[in-house]
Amino acid sequence: MEQFEVHILGCGSALPTTRHNPSSQIVRVGNELFMIDCGEGTQLQIRKSHQHFSRINNIFISHLHGDHCFGLIGLISTFGLLGRRHPLHIYAHPMMRTLLMPQIEYFCQGMQYEVILHDINPKTAGIIYEDNNVTVETLPLNHRIPCCGFIISEKPKKRHLRGEMAEYYNIPTYARQRIREGEDYTTPEGETIPNERLTTPPDPSRRYVYCSDTTPVPAGLIEKIRGADLLYHEATFAESEKGRAAATFHSTAQQAAAVALEAEAKKLVIGHFSSRYDDETPLLAQAQEIFPATILAKEGLTIKI
Amino acid sequence: MEQFEVHILGCGSALPTTRHNPSSQIVRVGNELFMIDCGEGTQLQIRKSHQHFSRINNIFISHLHGDHCFGLIGLISTFGLLGRRHPLHIYAHPMMRTLLMPQIEYFCQGMQYEVILHDINPKTAGIIYEDNNVTVETLPLNHRIPCCGFIISEKPKKRHLRGEMAEYYNIPTYARQRIREGEDYTTPEGETIPNERLTTPPDPSRRYVYCSDTTPVPAGLIEKIRGADLLYHEATFAESEKGRAAATFHSTAQQAAAVALEAEAKKLVIGHFSSRYDDETPLLAQAQEIFPATILAKEGLTIKI
């Protein structure tokens, strides 16, 4: 199966610490790198992760708090210095245009590529990006300011052509794609071979869901993320800070786990940790009480989906 | 003597690497921390250096290239989150106001302290900051865009009162400050004691000079930095890249050393290294051929002046 993995570049919250960078991650689907959020220092984290800068073509910003977007201008500037020629697409709240464009105009003069800003409405769910392999959808979240999560879903894949059958019937190359799309095959002699004899089922289409920053994903949206192969849900606080989590529109680790359980996610990764924790293993333990398949995000971590 | 030291937070150039952060340093004079330049990730570097955020009250920006100022908004935001109440002064090219203020207004709502921007004219030399202990002066440099260095000078200090003489003449506390400033002392009996019998000379006033980014400091400005206790001069390139240094308005390590020699600096620290070098010891060797008292800047390095 094609690569589909998440690289954590930063999983801290508003105050950076020596342990955590602010929010950013790269979702790799095949050779394409999608970036979600871009806190200060993200470009340094990319260098450390040895990802290819040039393969990042689409950046999705969940909301306009600094710890999710202060790294954009540095990254854009560096792309320019590296001689980038192909456009960079940024999907964000419309206000991003007002804040970012004057900086690009001033600091990135002579840059050889275009930054294309796409306004997103964080309050509605909908597809904001689509290519041959994936769709990216917004998921309205509940934070102090307009904020959305992102659902990255592989599109339905083609069936696998059984090699021995292709050989037996000597199926020409031009006919193979259609068979993989589900058609039967008619031999030159006029015999119809049913598709299920020629193919095996396609690989499953995988789905990654990113939810930060937010109170626990509300029940009304659970259907949208049901069965996700991997759910990233913020867990800014431990259970003892539940009141503070509610007051600041964040979640506790247990609340994140309850969302994963309710949504029947296959795996949960928690992040966006408050700077007050020197060690997040208590948060992990609290989450695992409810949803055992939970792991902690960490800078440098790669999670295969 | 009071502490007077330079902490290197970043000494890379435009492209950050896994070895170097973009430009920033803290100059500590007593309990006051002055920041010079503030590239992306500077606030993380401060955390690592265990400096006190709250003691930074004045930030001097040499020029408006991103690798010297992209970290400002994150730092300002973090000061706000940490509950800062006292004003922060930023000294920069007037354009900084246009670029920074909209970001502060949007991202730092409800912040409890004031950011005060002071316009500087990088093309003229002059005092831009002064307190009881130090002055900070601009030094016009020669870069692709308006750019200035900074000279941080201790003011002339008071003479030391000799303890045994103060005791012998039973000099009252109120009279001691004036004696330290050079006055003679007249005893209650009317006897005048000459100052040189009561005091020893003051500690020398030290001077730190920061020069980045620039072609070698031109001869006409050498007088301004003559005898500096410590000179930071950019050395973006090795001697083999002399042409490229000139073309991009930067310096080689040997050119930096020649400036230190000509200016009779006591010590030279070179920095702003190009990302092409995995190891700067050749640059050091080249500089030391001309000016032996040269050291390499490095993140985390503290240089006592």
Image (cartoon, coloured by chain):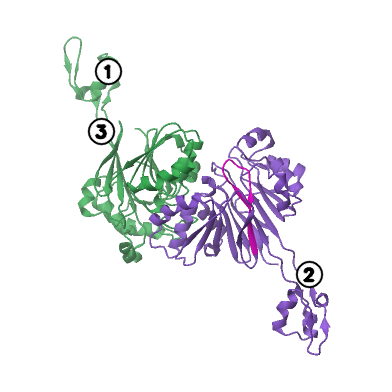
Chain colours: A green, B purple
Name the secondary structure under disc 2. Answer: loop
Secondary element at tag 3:
loop
Q: Observer-nearest residue: B269 or A55?
A: B269
Mark 1 nearby-residue class (10 Å; few <14, some 14–19, many ≥20): some
Q: What residue is at 46 percent from the left and 67 percent from the top? A: B85
Mark 1 residue element: helix
Chain of the residue on which disc 1 is drawn = A
Residue tagged by mark 3? A156
Mark linked to residue B32 = none
Labels 3 and 1 in the same subunit: yes
Q: Mark 2 belongs to which amino acid? A: Pro
Q: Position of residue B153 (x, y in %)?
A: 67, 60
Residue A89 at x, y percent in the picture: 37, 38
Q: Is residue A50 visible?
A: no
Name the image quarter holding the N terminus of chain B.
bottom right
Residues tagged 2 and 1 counted as in contact (Cβ below 8 A): no
Residue B147 among magenta residues: yes
Amino acid at dot 1: Ala
**Where are the magenta residues, as a range?**
B134-150
Q: Is residue A119 depicted above or below A279 in this figure?
A: above
Which residue type carries mark 3?
Pro
- Front-lying residue, B12 or A288: B12
Q: Quadrant of residue A55?
A: top left
Q: Position of residue A120 (x, y in %)?
A: 29, 44
Q: Does B180 appear above or below A100?
A: below
Q: Between tags 2 and 1, which lies in front?
A: 2
Q: What separation in Å lies between label 3 and label 2 (alpha carbons)? A: 84 Å
Report how far apart the C-alphas of labels 3 and 1 lie in the structure: 22 Å
Circle 2 is placed at which residue position? B201
Which residue is labeled 1 in the image? A166
For the residues beneath circles 2 and 1, the answer to whether they share a chain is no
Q: Earlier in the sequence, mark 3 or mark 1?
A: 3
